[in-house]
Amino acid sequence: MNKLKILFNGILKENPIFVLLIGMCPTLGTTTSAINGLGMGLSTMFVLICSNIVIALLKNLIPNKVRIPAFIVIIASFVTILQLFMQAFIPSLYSSLGLFIPLIVVNCLILARAESFANKNTAINAMFDGIGMGLGFTFALTLLGATREILGSGSIFDIKFIGDNDGILIFVLAPGAFIALGYLIAIINKLNKKTKQ
Amino acid sequence: MAKLESTLKNMILSLGIISLVASTLLAGVYILTKKPIEDSDKAKQLSAIQEVLPDKTAVVGEKVEIKLKDKEEAFVIYPATKNNQFIGCAIQTYSNEGYGGKISLMVGLDKEGNICNYMMLSSNETPGLGSKLTDWFKTKKGKQDIRGKNPEKDNFSVTKDGGDFDAITASTISSRAFLLSIKDAFEAFTQYKKTLK
């Protein structure tokens, strides 16, 4: 398979959030602002790339019946490494994402790519899949975070453009996450359809 | 190389080796990041202490723990001196009555017990609502600002409860918890002052 095709597959055609709809928990939970969405997206991308490569390299050494526990151990190790490094070197990001970092372990996007792609492809291809899917995920989370931040707090990347109490509060809260995501998916689907025709 | 058969021996070996390598790696990263994490925690605390003290050049002394009755955890007091004169202190205080559970903050008092400043350390309040605690009570607007006020003279409750301070719009619970934590800090301060004489 063409490497570029694998790369763009994750960003547009099979965008994990807008098209595949997997990994919804951190998507809805962390995207209260654009910067949080971006941070979460990049963290997930790091874990995804590392785990994809390692799993593709080890795929023949892991017997089929124990592949899921083996994948989870590998993914969890990378998540813990990421968590420790983040706590040590970017404490501000860690304090705003804190709770959701350990939850990357059970993000079904990562396990799904391990099972359906990395387990069947070479390490190089798996790496490109990780980058593509990771970028797609990051793009989606940042877009969702930005939308919610603009509507909910009247700012973008923490730069205020309207007064203090004039945001539409619901977009910062949980229901707003669902509403914003719904509309974004609708728009992306419409655009995807148009490009196909 | 062909995929390993799912025999008992293979499964135990493969999963065992993966776990062993993963745990060794994690132990290494843990040792590597232990020091920076401790440092960044300490730096964060020290900068919070200096931020809230009446004089930024003051010398921060040994911490003192004060236990109040009916409170589970002790309040930590960091006394500040200048030219060997007691000029005030920073108190790490908390309340378990927040909307999202525990809030913890650092509050600075001068030697008469007037509030100088405060800084949130951790909280799980709703983003966009209760999370406004970070700046709300140190913004000059209406009856918001607690700086320069003294819990001995002023009533540290929200106006809704007959107090002297405006609660955050739509976050009365968070505001109550905040003011309660300041009152408790002041009580700890009063007890601490008795030990000074």
Image (spheres, rainbow, N blue to C red):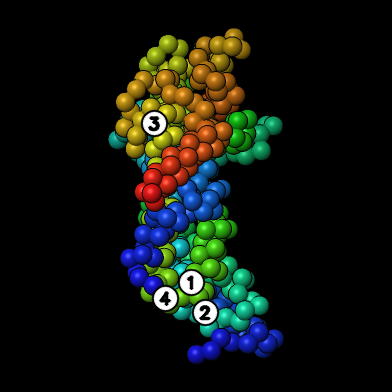
Cα separation, mark 3 vs mark 2, equals: 44 Å
Which quarter of the rendering shows the N terminus of chain A? bottom left
Residue A5 horizontal side relative to residue B97, left or right: left
Cα separation, mark 2 vs mark 1, equals: 8 Å
Which one is nearer the viewer's eye here, B44 or A190? A190
> Which amino acid, mark 1?
Ala
Q: Residue at x 46, y 24 (%)?
A: A168
Residue that numbered label 2 is attached to: A59
- Disc 2 + disc 1, Cβ < 8 Å: yes
Q: Residue at x 33, y 65 (%)?
A: A4
Same chain? Circles 4 and 3: yes
Residue that numbered label 4 is attached to: A123
Q: Residue at x 41, y 48 (%)?
A: A192
Same chain? Circles 3 and 2: yes
Residue that numbered label 1 is attached to: A118
> Which amino acid, mark 4?
Ala
Residue A121 visible in the current orientation? yes
Q: N-terminal of the two: label 4 or label 3? A: 4
Q: N-terminal of the two: label 4 or label 2? A: 2
Q: Using a 10 Å C-alpha cutoff, classify the residue at mark 1 as few (fewer than 14 neighbours), some (14 to 19) or many (20 or more).
A: many
Label 3: chain?
A: A
Which label number is shown at residue A195? Answer: none
Cα separation, mark 1 vs mark 3, equals: 37 Å
